Image: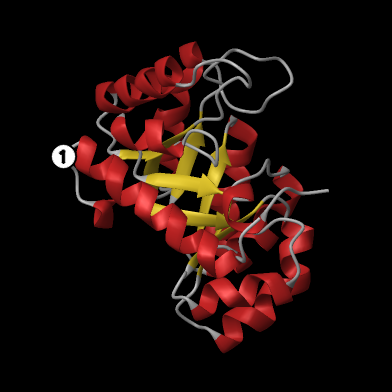
């Protein structure tokens, strides 16, 4: 595995190549470096190379390492990409700059309450269970219009849609479906694509890609 800074250069090159194929600007694609389980010592080399958008899966883990880093690097954006319990909504709104996993009415209510209390509005992606997998978070495709209506009514800044396609099968059809759902609902943001499939996601319209192992190496 390359050092993180070398990996970052390689990922950026792949982003640029995929964007050219899709006749898009690579500057329109946000690379979220997924730093879950990684210590500060492994995160800082990427910061030194100019990476400024990072993602974490769990509020508690992020609270342990990111307040200090954000104080030292105030231009960093921190995105929550994992499932969020409603009772952690206020903690999430206080620390994160975007949330990618809004997937149920109770969470919308909790986030709206937290944002009102803290006076902070942060962009939210609605997660769609694009493969109808019981073990995964995300709202059912059939429930998406109602959930989007609730998000808008609650005043949450709606950034777009997010998905995690089923593992071990071709991701492209699922990315294409998410892009169609976004277009049908007047949304432009698409949080889709991870280390193994982000180039495919870019060609199908991803605006935010969530890359971990291609940057940091395999996790334990």
**Residue sitting at x 68%, y 50%:** 57
Residue farthest toward the left in the current orientation of the protein: 23
Counting from the top left corner in percent of width and height, residue 68 is at 68, 83
Q: Taking 30 as reference, is 184 left or right?
A: left
Binning the other alpha carbons within 10 Å of mark 1 as few (below 14), some (14 to 19) or many (20 upward) gives few
Give how far across and how far down residue 175 sits, in percent: 41, 24
Above or below — where is 198 with respect to 52? above
Q: Position of residue 76 (x, y in %)?
A: 49, 73
Measured along the vertical axis of the image, is residue 88 above or below residue 191?
Answer: below
Which residue sits furthest right? Answer: 220
The color scheme shown is secondary structure
Name the residue beneath numbered marker 1.
23
How many discs mark residues in the rendered view?
A: 1
Q: Answer with the quarter of the image where residue 109 lies.
A: top right
The N terminus lies in quadrant:
bottom right
Q: Secondary structure at mark 1?
A: loop
| Residue ID at (52%, 80%) | 48
- Foreground of the two, 147 or 95: 95
Q: Is residue 156 above or below residue 45?
A: above
Residue lying at 41% horizontally and 15% vertically, measured from the top left: 173
Quadrant for residue 66, please give it: bottom right
Please state which of residues 211 and 104 is positioned toward the viewer in this rendering: 211
Nearest the camera: 70 or 124? Answer: 70
């Amino acid at each position: 595995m390359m050092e993180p800074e070398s990996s970052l250069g390689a990922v950026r090159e792949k982003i640029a190549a995929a964007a050219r194929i899709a006749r898009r600007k690579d500057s329109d694609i946000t690379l979220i470096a997924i730093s879950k389980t990684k210590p500060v010592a492994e995160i800082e080399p990427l910061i030194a190379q100019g990476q400024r958008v990072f993602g974490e899966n769990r509020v508690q883990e992020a609270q342990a390492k990111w307040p200090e880093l954000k104080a030292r690097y105030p231009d960093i954006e921190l995105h929550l990409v994992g499932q969020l319990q409603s009772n952690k909504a206020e903690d999430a709104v206080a620390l994160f700059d975007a949330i990618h996993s809004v997937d149920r009415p109770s969470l919308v209510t909790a986030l709206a309450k937290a944002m009102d209390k803290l006076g902070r509005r942060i962009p939210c992606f609605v997660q769609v269970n694009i493969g109808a997998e019981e073990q995964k978070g995300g709202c059912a495709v059939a429930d998406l219009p109602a959930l989007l209506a609730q998000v808008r009514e609650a005043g949450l800044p709606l950034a777009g849609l997010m998905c995690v396609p089923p593992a071990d099968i071709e991701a492209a059809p699922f990315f294409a479906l998410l892009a169609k759902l976004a277009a049908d609902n007047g949304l432009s943001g698409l949080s889709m694509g991870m280390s193994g499939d982000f180039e495919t996601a870019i060609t199908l319209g991803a605006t935010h890609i969530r890359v971990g192992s291609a940057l940091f190496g395999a996790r334990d």
